[in-house]
Structures are given as structure tokens and as C-alpha cells.
């Protein structure tokens, strides 16, 4: 078959046979977010380019090298979101959500776009789940946010993630660190890549997350930020650690984490694994106390994290964590002849109205082919309607797992009878499951 085109490089499809895995993870995340008081926010997939230039930072790899930016027919420059924080913050300000009572807690599922070199677990379109908290400077908020992330991983039985924590200071202490970095990197001016050379005067911290092998080797010997933070940042960082200790959340302090986006201040963290090769960061976040102000709002300390859905799913698969299969067809009614098909059509609707899954033939297949299909989709029960059944106004309901057969009437009591058999089989299956 000659397809006229294939998926764009760096993108992936989630197929119907696999989507239950995503839905399972999403359900756990939604429930967990709700239990911490987060409500969902949905923002557009593209924003004015300046939002990311100003928010994420124009010396970051994301803005300098990876954005999908284009001019609209009206001449505006818009960008497909490379991450979810900037858009959520823009919406928070635009709709004056700060009047809703602080802190405001927002959760989101977003698709993100970064023009990166494709690797295992690194895509050009990927998906994030994120939590953002607006309007609190307290270390309790940092600890609560990190605990929420940990709790999602616990609920998904993902054990192989290490939490790494750091503080990257505030506008008070950052200049001291910048000075130390500038002095250090200036020795290597002749070896740094062109982008990093320009970062040297504008934002030397960004050299620390350059992906070029030469720059990253030089960065290994650079001064670490924890040696330069001020007393307020240090005491904030110590408090966060105390709360995490109290909550039993294990972590290590890694003074080399600086994160790749410009808005971060104070606490930053990553959940990393060694089970995914080079792309081991599954979740990242931290405080961004200056972002809301930078986008035109008042000074409103805030914080958040995002986790990569693809990476988390890959990790779960690598660890052999079983994801419960999605629901299957409860009843398939196979038919022979038009009258039977009409009857089945209305019986199937009755079953569906009770939130069960029911299907019948919509292809015009032979009875044999219909039964084969019922088998293929794993239908729990099947029923055949033909001339005899129509004449007698009853049919045989078959449990496809046990082979057990039950007569059911095709009158008004059909659903009641079917449901009784269904529940009986379901509770027996549950009992068997509990006994094993
Ligand atoms: P980030 O570290 O750039 O942070 O991305 C968060 C997560 O998204 C990463 O840990 C990773 O799992 C996933 N991810 C990033 N890039 C890719 C890619 N190319 N392919 C697959 N997965 C990827 C942020 O985006 C911040 N907005 C997080 C945040 C929220 N900070 C505060 N609030």
C-alpha cells in the first residue's frame, strides 16, 4: 500500500488498543490532583510568541532553538506551546484568577511542541501533566507540591524514580552566582559554542544546560549555585527539606540541577530514573516567584511541575507495571435477517443506556463472521437473534468465558434478566479473582 504520507518526524500516535494506558494514568492524575485541591485549566495550543520569549526566557534552548513559531495570515507571530506553565500563567492573569482566593491551584494535560533531535523518549510532540500553584511563598507549598507528584508515582506503583532537589536562589543572590559563573566560563571562551558565548554575558546559568558535548563537559567543573544562595533562600530550602522529611518523601540534594527554563527561583526539583537511558527526567518543576510579575501582574510567588506522559508510560512499561486493561464489550448481539437486526438495534440501545458496552453488526456480515468479531473484541456475553428467536420472542445469552447459556426473553424484561445474569457472572469472576 502506498501511503500518501506518514506521521511527522518526532510525533507518535496513540492507538485504540493502547489508549487505555493513557486513560488509566490520566484518571490517577486527575483524582490525585483533585484530592490536593487542584482544578483543571485548559489553554490554547498556541500563544503569542512573546509569551514564551518573556516567560520561558530568550536565552533558553527551548526559545532559541526549539520553538515552532510561525506567522499567521494576519501577520501575528504565534508559537505552539513548548510547555504548559507560561500559558497557564497568562490565563491566570488575563482572567484575574487571583480574585478567586489565593492560592489558586490549577492542573492541566497539554500537548507540547519542541523542535528537538528525536531520541528514545524525546519527541517533537509530547504530552505533559502539570500542577501550578499561584500566590504563596511558603515552603509548605513547595513540600505539598512535591508530595503531590510523589503521590501520583506511588499510586501508579512507579518505584524507580529518585527525587533530586536544589535551590537556585533569588534575584538577591543570583548576581553573585552569575559573577562566579562568568569568571569560570570566561576561561573557556575559545571552546564554548556560539550560543553559549552569547549566554556568557546575558545569562551564564544557561550554559549549564547546553546539550553540546564540549559545553556540557566544561560545565561539569563550574561553581555550584548552592554555594552562593542568600540566607533567606537557604532557610527556605531547609524548611522545604524538613517538611519533606516529615512527610517521609525521600530525596537527595543535587546542587547541579538548574532546570532549562529561565523563570525558576529558589526550589527546583526533578524526578529522575536510570531505566530510560539518556532521557531519564520524568518530571521537573520548581518555584517561579518572579514570573507573574514579569508577565505584567503583581508580585505573586508561584510554583509548579510537569511530568512527561510518554516518559512515565515508558518507565512503567520498562518496570513491567501492569496497567488494568480498559473495559470491553459487555454484550454482542449477532443477527440474521432484517427483523432481527431491528430488534437487536433497540436491545443494544437499552443496554448502552445503563452504561454498559453493547455492540451489534454494522457491517452486514454473515452470522459466522459476526461471532468471530465478537470473539476478537473479547465480548463478555453474546446472543444470536434469528427467525426462531424472533418467533419465540426469546434468545440464548452466552457467557463467552464460561460457555454457560441462559434463556432470556426479548420483551420489556430483557434488560432486567440480562443484567441479573451479568451481575451474577461479574461477582463470580470477582470472587475467583480474590481467591487467587
Ligand atoms: P521541562 O523539564 O521542560 O519542564 O518538562 C517537563 C517534563 O516534560 C520533562 O521532565 C519530561 O518528562 C517531559 N519532556 C520535556 N521535553 C520532552 C520531549 N522532547 N519529549 C518527551 N518528553 C519531554 C517544563 O516544561 C516546566 N513547564 C515544568 C513546570 C511546571 N515548572 C513549573 N511548573
Image (spheres, helix red, strand yellow):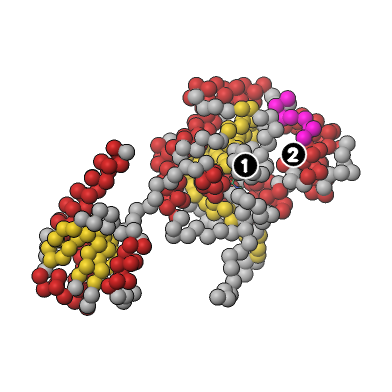
Span of residues in magenta: 220-227
Tell me the residue at 12%/60% (across/down): 413
Mark 2 crowdedness (10 Å alpha carbons): few <14, some 14-19, many ≥20: many
Q: Nearer the viewer, residue 340 or 395?
A: 395
Task: Say which residue label 1 marks.
Answer: 280
Q: Position of residue 360 (x, y in %)?
A: 28, 68
* Residue 225 lies in the magenta-colored region: yes
**Depth-wise, is mark 1 or mark 2 nearer the camera?**
1
SS assignment at label 1: loop
| Left or right: where 343 falls relative to 199 | left
Relative to 96, is 388 on the left or the right?
left
The quadrant in which the N terminus is found is bottom right
| Mark 1 / mark 2, whichever is N-terminal | 2
Q: Which residue position holds label 2?
A: 208
On the image, the x and y values in percent for residue 379 come to 30, 59
Where is residue 155 drawn, in percent x and y?
A: 44, 37
Dividing the picture into quadrants, the one containing residue 214 is top right
Furthest residue to the left? 392
Image check: 56 left or right of 414? right
Task: Check the image and name the residue furthest to the bottom.
Answer: 338
Residue at the image position 50 percent from the left and 58 percent from the top = 14
Q: CA distance from mark 1 to mark 2?
A: 17 Å
Q: Position of residue 4 (x, y in %)?
A: 58, 75
Amino acid at each position: 500500500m502506498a501511503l500518501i504520507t506518514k506521521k511527522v518526524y518526532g510525533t507518535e500516535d496513540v492507538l485504540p488498543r493502547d489508549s487505555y494506558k493513557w486513560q488509566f494514568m490520566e484518571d490517577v492524575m486527575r483524582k490525585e490532583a483533585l484530592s490536593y485541591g487542584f482544578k483543571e485549566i485548559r489553554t490554547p495550543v498556541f500563544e503569542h510568541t512573546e509569551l514564551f520569549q518573556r516567560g520561558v526566557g530568550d536565552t533558553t534552548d527551548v526559545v532559541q532553538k526549539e520553538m515552532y513559531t510561525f506567522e499567521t495570515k494576519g501577520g501575528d507571530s504565534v508559537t505552539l506551546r513548548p510547555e504548559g506553565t507560561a500559558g497557564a500563567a497568562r490565563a491566570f492573569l488575563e482572567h484575574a484568577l487571583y480574585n478567586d482566593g489565593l492560592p489558586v491551584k490549577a492542573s492541566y494535560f497539554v500537548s507540547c511542541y519542541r523542535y528537538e533531535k528525536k531520541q528514545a523518549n524525546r519527541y517533537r510532540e509530547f504530552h505533559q501533566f502539570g500542577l501550578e500553584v499561584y500566590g504563596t511563598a511558603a515552603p509548605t507549598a513547595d513540600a505539598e507540591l512535591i508530595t503531590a507528584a510523589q503521590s501520583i508515582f506511588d499510586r501508579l506503583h512507579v518505584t524507580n524514580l529518585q527525587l533530586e532537589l536544589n535551590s537556585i536562589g533569588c534575584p538577591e543572590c543570583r548576581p553573585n552566582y552569575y559573577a562566579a559563573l562568568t569568571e569560570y566560563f570566561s576561561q573557556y571562551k575559545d571552546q564554548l559554542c556560539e550560543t553559549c558565548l552569547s549566554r556568557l554575558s546575558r545569562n551564564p546559568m544557561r550554559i549549564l544546560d547546553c546539550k553540546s558535548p564540549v559545553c556540557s563537559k566544561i560545565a561539569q567543573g563550574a561553581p555550584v549555585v548552592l554555594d552562593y544562595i542568600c540566607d533567606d533562600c537557604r532557610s527556605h530550602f531547609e524548611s522545604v527539606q524538613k517538611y519533606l522529611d516529615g512527610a517521609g518523601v525521600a530525596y537527595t540534594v543535587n546542587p547541579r540541577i538548574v532546570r532549562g527554563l529561565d523563570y525558576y527561583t529558589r526550589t527546583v526539583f526533578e524526578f529522575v530514573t536510570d531505566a530510560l537511558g539518556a532521557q531519564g527526567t520524568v518530571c521537573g518543576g520548581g518555584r517561579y516567584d518572579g514570573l507573574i510579575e514579569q508577565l505584567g501582574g503583581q508580585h505573586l510567588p508561584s510554583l509548579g511541575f510537569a511530568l512527561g506522559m510518554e516518559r512515565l508510560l515508558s518507565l512503567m512499561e520498562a518496570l513491567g507495571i501492569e496497567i488494568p486493561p480498559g473495559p470491553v464489550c459487555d454484550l454482542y448481539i449477532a443477527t440474521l435477517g432484517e427483523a432481527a437486526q431491528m430488534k437487536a438495534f433497540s436491545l443494544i440501545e437499552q443496554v448502552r443506556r445503563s452504561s454498559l458496552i453493547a455492540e451489534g453488526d454494522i457491517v452486514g456480515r454473515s452470522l459466522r463472521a459476526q461471532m468471530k468479531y465478537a470473539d476478537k473484541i473479547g465480548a463478555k456475553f453474546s446472543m444470536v437473534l434469528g427467525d426462531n428467536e424472533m418467533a419465540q420472542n426469546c434468545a440464548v445469552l452466552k457467557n463467552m468465558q464460561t460457555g454457560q447459556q441462559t434463556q432470556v426473553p426479548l420483551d420489556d424484561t430483557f434488560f432486567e434478566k440480562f443484567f441479573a445474569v451479568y451481575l451474577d457472572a461479574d461477582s463470580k469472576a470477582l470472587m475467583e479473582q480474590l481467591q487467587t
